[in-house]
Image (cartoon, helix red, strand yellow):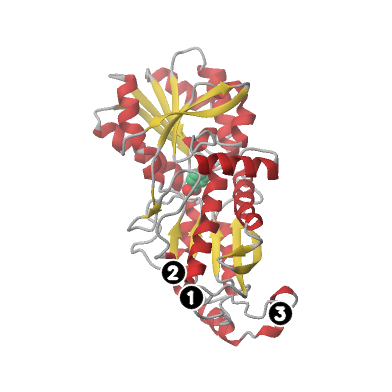
Amino acid sequence: MSFLSASFLRKAAVVPALVGAMMLTACGGGSLGGGSGGSGGTSGSVKIGLSVPKSGTYAALGKDMEQGFKLYLTQNDNKLGGKTVQLVETDEGNGPQTGIPATERLVTQDQVSAVVGLVNSATASGLANTFNQNKVPLIVANAGSDKLVDTPSDYIWRTSFTNGGVNAPMGAKVKEEIGSGSVYLLGSDYAAGKEQVGGFKKAFTAAGGKVAGEEYTPPFGATTDWQPYLNNVRNSGAKAVYVFYAGSEAVGFVKQFKQFLGGTGIKLYGSGFLTEGSVLDAQGDAANGVQTSLHYSDQLDNPKNKEFVKAYSDAYKTSPTVYSVQAYDAANVLAEALKKADGTTGEAIGAAIGKVGQIDSPRGTWSFNAQHDPDQKYYLREVRVVDGKRVNAVVEELKAG
Ligand code: PHB
């Protein structure tokens, strides 16, 4: 569907299509122009889209995000900033081929007032224009594409990170730990893999670090045999390996690293997605000692996080992850914006997101920077067994990269 016809449809479509809950909460918004008007309004409803993977390599990450977003709704009587939420969910799937059309439909067909979600960098980058052109805010709750848009706009925000930003603080740290030794770089073969590993490489070489080799392992999301790459690592004489893998690839990689290089003394580092959440349980003791950088661990010792971990664990019988927090915070951002917005149109919400200020998050308070990404701290984490449970223990706050 072209953008022209989409925007025509938005104006032409009228309320009869919307029945049930929307009718009962008469001021329902979407982009249909039904905004309740006036800032601070506490009645009416708002239609929000949630696009996360329910299938593919990153399905587990999508589940964490969905749970984080829904926990906020449950805790707030299914309201964001006083508006009852009509949630429209879609499956982002494995990559842009599925994620772009599915997410576009939320805007063009479902006519939501804002969308939250997106795990995959390639999908998020491919969607930015759609949101700008349709004047509907997108709150990216994971995908870290270093350059999501050329110029920040009211319609593109992120509650997660940039790919380079997560990894840069590890450059100086790894150099300090391995001294004159070299590092072999490996990553998932797509945009985020290259940007994540690239962020580390830039900071590491700037600190005087030496790179022994660099490979991206195709096909994206489906690599199952790392033995050839791990042989290259061994033959290179590298003292350490730095990687980006997430989701199901993270499980396979960490297990094979232990199988083929365990006992050689070669250390494994990466961005924190490598050992986050359900993948850590699946990796088992192969993950012990792996050191990573991330802006969250469920082990962070602050009152807001303790409260969040308890509420999340009570609700879902599992610990929250960085993905859960990023989506929980996206709900919080929307709630704060809706309190300030003059109505529930995409334009009103987009403008109000720029005014939300500090977000009180389980990761610690943060606010949007000039690029509309979180200004936040990063932590060195190490996989350890604490009180019989394998966790990402927080070692220290990392210096900015
Ligand atoms: C990304 O594609 O930006 C991405 C995916 C999974 C992660 C982190 C980043 O865990």
Q: Nearer the viewer, mark 3 or mark 1?
A: 1
Q: Dot 2 lies on which element?
A: helix
- Which sits in the foreground, 18 or 332? 332
Question: Mark 3 belongs to which amino acid?
Answer: Met
Name the residue rendered at 37%, 17% in the picture: 237
- Which sits in the foreground, 83 or 216? 83
Considering only vertical position in the picture, is 387 above or below 253? above
Q: CA distance from mark 2 to mark 1?
A: 10 Å
Compare marks 3 and 1 and give the one earlier in the sequence: 3
Is there a contact, CB below 8 Å, between mark 2 and mark 1? Answer: yes
Q: CA distance from mark 3 to mark 2?
A: 26 Å
Q: Which residue is mark 2?
A: 352
Question: Mark 1 belongs to which amino acid?
Answer: Ser
Q: Which residue is mark 1?
A: 39
- Which sits in the foreground, 273 or 244? 273
In percent of width and height, residue 300 lies at 49, 35
The answer to whether 232 appears left or right of 321 in the picture is left
Name the residue rendered at 57%, 19% in the picture: 259
In percent of width and height, residue 191 lies at 44, 48
